[in-house]
Amino acid sequence: MEWAAEHQAELAEDWCRASSGEPIVRIAPLAWNGLTMLTIRSVETLDDYWLRLTLSDRTTIERDVSDLLRGPVFEGLRTNYAEFRQARVRHGSVEWPGDLDLAPEALIWDGPVPHDSSRRPPARLVLHHPTGEPVR
């Protein structure tokens, strides 16, 4: 990966620091097309299948994910709200027990990452399934 090669010395220094119990030094995040890739840092479940997400740039956004929880794989989350409340962040996205997850670009942008570097994710958004078909 290009980013790792570019930051190899910094990564090695951080490894030494971490191995000796010292705090690591922040390294510039991966950028894509001039954009810093936003990832999800924390999640809080709210009522009615809303999630409050804190992003890697420290902004907080809220998303209604009810329309994304379709099909048999998400049935447990749809029918058992206690299971939905077990949401956690892993690898920059939201996941639930059973290796269920939603793509971070869908959660942050409701689709692909925009090419416009000045664009910020909306603070509150109802997300829509890509097919646009009503839930059955």
Image: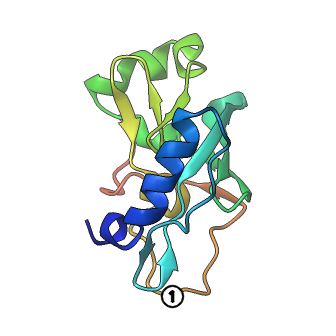
Query: Percent from the top left, x then y, of residue 17?
Result: 57, 44
7 in relation to 68, above or below: below
Q: Quadrant of residue 88?
A: top right
Q: Which residue is mark 1?
A: 116
Q: Quadrant of residue 52?
A: top right
For image coordinates 64% across by 37% down, the residue present is 43
Q: 121 or 6: which is nearer to us?
A: 6
What colour scheme has been applied to the protein in the rendered image? Answer: rainbow
Query: How many marks can you see?
Result: 1
Q: Is residue 73 above or below residue 44?
A: above
Which quadrant of the rendered structure holds the N terminus?
bottom left
> Against 45, is 30 above or below?
below
Quarter holding the C terminus? top left
Residue 45 relative to residue 78: left or right: right
Drawn side of residue 30 relative to residue 22, left or right? left
Residue 90 spot, x, y in % from top left: 47, 35
* Helix, strand or loop for disc 1: loop
User: What x and y, as percent, mark residue 68?
Assistant: 42, 42
Q: Is residue 47 left or right of residue 26?
A: right
Residue at 61% x, 20% y is 85
- Report the residue at 38% width, 68% height from top: 112
Packing grade of label 1 (10 A; few <14, some 14-19, many >=20) is few
**Residue sitting at x 37%, y 20%:** 75
As shown in the figure, which amino acid type bears the numbered disc 1?
Asp
In the drawing, does residue 53 fall left or right of residue 10? right
Q: Residue 58: x, y in percent? A: 73, 57
Q: Nearer the viewer, residue 64 or 119?
A: 119
